[in-house]
Structures are given as C-alpha cells and as structure tokens.
Image (tube, rainbow, N blue to C red):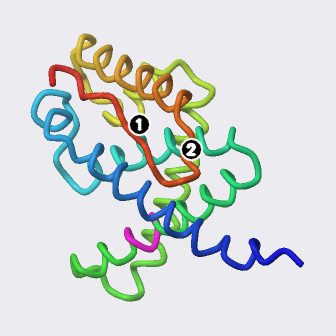
C-alpha cells in the first residue's frame, strides 16, 4: 500500500505558499513602480502579482499533474490572500465577493492575453491600462517577462523553489 499520496496535499500546499511568497516579492520590486511605469496602487499591485502568478502557473502547467495541482493551490492561495487584503482595507463583507470575482475574471483575461497575444500590446492593455507609456519602458518590461519565462523553463517549481531574473536596471 502506497502512503505517499496521503502526504501529497501538504507538500503541494507548502510548495504553493513558497511560490506565492516569491512571486509577491518579485511583483513588489520597486523598479516596476519607480521606473517601470506601473501604478503604485491597488490595481497596479494586483497587475504585477497577476503577471508573476501567470509566469509561475504557466510553468507549473508544463510540469504535469503535480505541477497543475500546485498551480491550483497557488491560485486558491492568491485569491484567499487578495480577499484578506480587501477586508483589511475596509471593503465590506458584501463587496468582497464581487471584487474577488472581478479580480478572478481579470486574472483569467490577463493570463489568456499574455499567453496568446503580442506581449507588448498585452502589457499596455493590462499592466498599463492602455495609458500612454514610453515604448522603451514597455520594451524593458516585456524583455523582463521574456527573460523570466526563459529562466522558469530551466527550473522545476514543484518543490516551491523559484528564482526570477533581476528587474530591468537592477
């Protein structure tokens, strides 16, 4: 009798927590807000977390059943944390589910766009909310995303370890 499967959920949860901590750390890099044109606001912070979560989940999807299970745990953890954050900011109990639903839809839309659209156009539309932004800044962030995707392809994330490349100009 294999008992290994009994311990898998806690291993997956631990991996998801570690990955989430690392992706939030990367998303909070001050360069993105000071020099990268990302709004230092709730929306801007969400967009950076969503971008980094997509990078991690995209990589996990390529790691088979285990990776997909961890990606689901990561998704659940991310939205529980966003729920908690909204409540701490004073969003009422009736407003939180509506905001979380909108954030989930936004995340799915961004993930689809980052996976299938021209990356620079997707960044302008989603990360910068179609605002006028210097094309060199967009190119720097797009280059960072491309470098991050490449770096993550070289890593197995199922143990919860991830290393993002340095932000542009770092």
Q: Is the magenta stretch mostly helix, strand or loop?
A: helix
Q: Nearer the viewer, residue 27 or 38?
A: 27
Q: Residue 30 occupies which quadrant of the picture?
A: top left
Answer whether labels 1 and 2 touch (C-beta < 8 Å): yes
Label 1 environment density (alpha carbons within 10 Å; few <14, some 14–19, many ≥20): many
Question: Is residue 79 found inside the magenta-colored segment of the image?
Answer: yes
Mark 1, secondary structure of its residue: helix
Query: In which quadrant is the C terminus drawn?
Result: top left
Label 2 environment density (alpha carbons within 10 Å; few <14, some 14–19, many ≥20): few
As drawn, 98 above or below 55: below
Q: Which residue is drawn at 62% across and 61% down?
A: 72
Q: Nearer the viewer, residue 29 or 103?
A: 29
Looking at the image, residue 36 sits to the left or right of residue 43; the answer is left
Q: Which label number is shown at residue 163?
A: none
Q: Which residue lies furthest to the front in this view?
A: 1
Q: Position of residue 80 (x, y in %)?
A: 45, 74
Q: Which residue is drawn at 51% across and 60% down?
A: 15
Looking at the image, residue 1 sits to the left or right of residue 113; the answer is right
Task: For marks 1 and 2, give the CA distance.
Answer: 9 Å
> Which residues are the magenta region?
78-82
Q: Residue 148 occupies which quadrant of the picture?
A: top left
The residue at which mark 1 appears reads as: 126
As drawn, 104 above or below 82: above
Number of marks present in the image shown: 2
Question: Is residue 114 found inside the magenta-colored segment of the image?
Answer: no
Q: Position of residue 61 (x, y in %)?
A: 67, 44
Q: Which label number is shown at residue 109?
A: 2
Q: Which residue lies furthest to the right in this view?
A: 1
């Amino acid at each position: 009798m294999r008992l290994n499967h009994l311990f898998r959920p806690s291993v997956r949860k631990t991996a998801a927590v570690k990955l989430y901590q690392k992706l939030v750390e990367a998303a909070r890099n001050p360069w993105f807000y000071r020099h990268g044109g990302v709004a230092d606001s709730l929306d801007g912070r969400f967009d950076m977390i969503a971008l980094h979560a997509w990078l991690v989940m995209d990589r996990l999807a390529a790691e088979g059943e285990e990776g997909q299970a961890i990606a689901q745990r990561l998704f659940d953890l991310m939205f529980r944390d966003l729920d908690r954050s909204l409540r701490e900011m004073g969003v009422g109990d009736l407003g939180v589910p509506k905001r979380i639903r909108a954030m989930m839809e936004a995340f799915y839309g961004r993930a689809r766009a980052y996976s299938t659209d021209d990356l620079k156009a997707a960044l302008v539309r989603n990360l910068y909310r179609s605002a006028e932004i210097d094309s060199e800044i967009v190119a720097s962030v797009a280059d960072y995303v491309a470098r991050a995707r490449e770096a993550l392809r070289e890593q197995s994330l199922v143990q919860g370890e991830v290393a993002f490349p340095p932000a542009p100009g770092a």
